[in-house]
Amino acid sequence: MDRMAFATSVVMRCGEQRSDPAQVSRRSVMKLVSSFGAFMLPGPVKVAFADDDRIPEDIRGYASRVDSFTLPNGFKFVVLERGVSPTVSFVTYVDVGASDEVAGKTGIAHFLEHLAFKGTQTIGTKDYAREIALLNEIDDLNEQKKQISDKKKRKLSTIDEKILSATAQAEELVISNDFSRIVQQEGGVGLNAATSIDSTQYFYNFPSNKTELWFALESERFQKPVFRQFEKEKAVVLEERKLRVDNDSVGKFLEQYLMKAYDEHPYRRPVIGFEQDIRGLSRADVMSFFRKYYRPENITFGIVGDTNVEEVKKLAEKYFGGFEAGEKSNRSIPEEPVQKQEKSVVMKLDSEPWYVEGYHVPAFGAPEYPALRLLEGVLSGGRTSRLFRSLVLDKRIALQASFSSGFPGDKYASLGLLFALPAPGKSLDSVRDALREQIETLKREGVRPSELAQIKRSLKVSYLNAFQSNETMAGFLCEFAAKTGDAKNAFRLLSALDEVKPEDVTNLARTIFVESNRTVGKIV
């Protein structure tokens, strides 16, 4: 693998599985911008700031065009009228990800995302009544198969033959890619989805005169889903796992690294799932997960572009008002115990050597989070940052060096990664020593006020540039609505960043960069 591609792949594998590599750019921008989402809240909350005073004056007018509302059943909508072109971007943000899975059923959130565009009771089928009867028959046969021991090979063979026959008959009733065909036929573009450790997002764009069609399609997709072509899609997911993990040195390493860094929290498990778990998943498992978590309370819709909020409210009530709220999703996420000693993972793989140090860092919304975002900038915010300037430009011992938090997610306390790719002929020990030298210098001498001011300006520019994309803004607003209870907190973050002082960043560095909080990883 090319060395720079190798480094980039680290970021792409930080807890997110995409259905299409072409969407890396959009998702990377979302990760970049949302990572600047710092605001002084005591953890994940559902109460927004009561006033708009903390929204910077130069973007207050833009923020005032954001309108949010919630239906009685719990569905949340965030609308931003922006008539730059006659198009609208739609993002469906489901506050459910791989961290909501249970042991033995890993990969189910990602698998569900794959099945979500397979159609409904009216889309994607030639005869739903016949098809569902066959799908139920296949489910029953698979359950029978689980109850039979491997010794009874003749009986297993008979069941397998019945499964193959029913599957072939069901396949004949499927209209493949019917949902995407309708979207494309009506002028829709960018139909895709992404599953992360924290959430699942679905997104596409329509001409503004197709807004009601989006409501009709999306409501039916959530109300009457049919998880057809299950085994065929399972094979696709298994192949994806093979490509991204089993046959990929970085993916293989990161899977083992997370299991070492975390003892209890589900962040230790891969988004794509373990192979044995994927193979064991059934249609009933996926449907059970869907019914438990894909409830109105967990779903936020972002609509940005040439739209009208009053029209959106009418369509929301028409197409989503009839959904039942259902029982509240009870989530029981194990708390990760405090790490008390350094851990390490060393793997000999067919790959370039690589060095990483992971440190447990605060979650999105924690009081220290603004300082964490700025700490990232101090260490790796461009070519003038401390790590790049020292290790890459001055000493020339690394091709790349950086610090990035939010691995593999940020809904809960996560990892901040220090990593470096040694330059040809340079050792892992040399980049380790150089990284730690920079960290110790920072802890000892602190952050310079001029340095911090420059980083704040840079972050603001990056943030404002994201406003140019309707789709990015839709996802951005959804994320803040889901994680903080108010989409406008996305604008208030700039004020929160401005309030951070150099000593706040220095104190945070002194807190997190300690040996007992460190997990070292090496590919040799």
Image: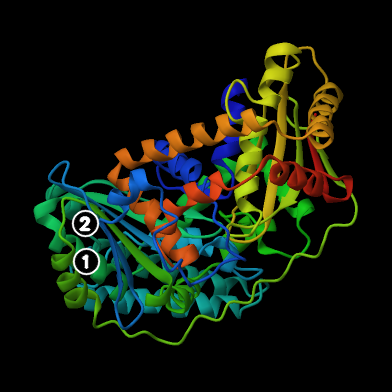
Classify residue 162 by image quadrant: bottom left
What residue type is disc 2 on?
A: Asp
284 or 208: nearer the viewer: 208
- The residue lying at 24 percent from left, 73 percent from top is 121
Which part of the image, by quadrant, shows the N terminus? top right
x and y, in percent, of residue 15 in the image: 58, 50
Q: Is residue 101 visible?
A: yes
Looking at the image, can residue 247 be seen? no
**Left or right: 97 in relation to 375:** left
Residues 182 and 321: in front is 321
Separation of residues labelled 2 and 1 (CA atoms): 8 Å
Q: Nearer the viewer, mark 2 or mark 1?
A: 2
Instruction: Please give the label number shown on residue 422.
Output: none
Q: In which quadrant of the rendered view does residue 139 lie?
A: bottom left
At 53% from the left edge and 46% from the top edge, which residue is drawn? 35
Label ID, residue 178: 2
Label at residue 125: 1
In the image shown, does 60 or 90 lie closer to the viewer? Answer: 60
Q: What is the x, y in percent for residue 206?
A: 18, 50
The crowding category of the residue bearing disc 1, from other C-alpha atoms within 10 Å (few below 14, some 14 to 19, many at least 20), is: many
- Identify the mark nearer the N-term, 2 or 1: 1
Considering every residue shown, the one lying at the far left of the view is 209
Using the image as rendered, state which of residue 498 and residue 384 is in the foreground: 498
Q: Amino acid at mark 1?
A: Thr
Instruction: Note whether 290 is above or below 453 in the view shown.
Output: below
Q: Residues within 10 Å of mark 2 (few under 14, many from 20)?
A: some
In the picture, residue 147 is in which quadrant? bottom right
Secondary structure under tag 1 reads: loop
**Horizontal side of residue 491 vs 362, given as left or right:** left
User: Where residue 288 sits: x, y (%)?
Assistant: 47, 78
**Image x and y of residue 479, in percent:** 44, 58
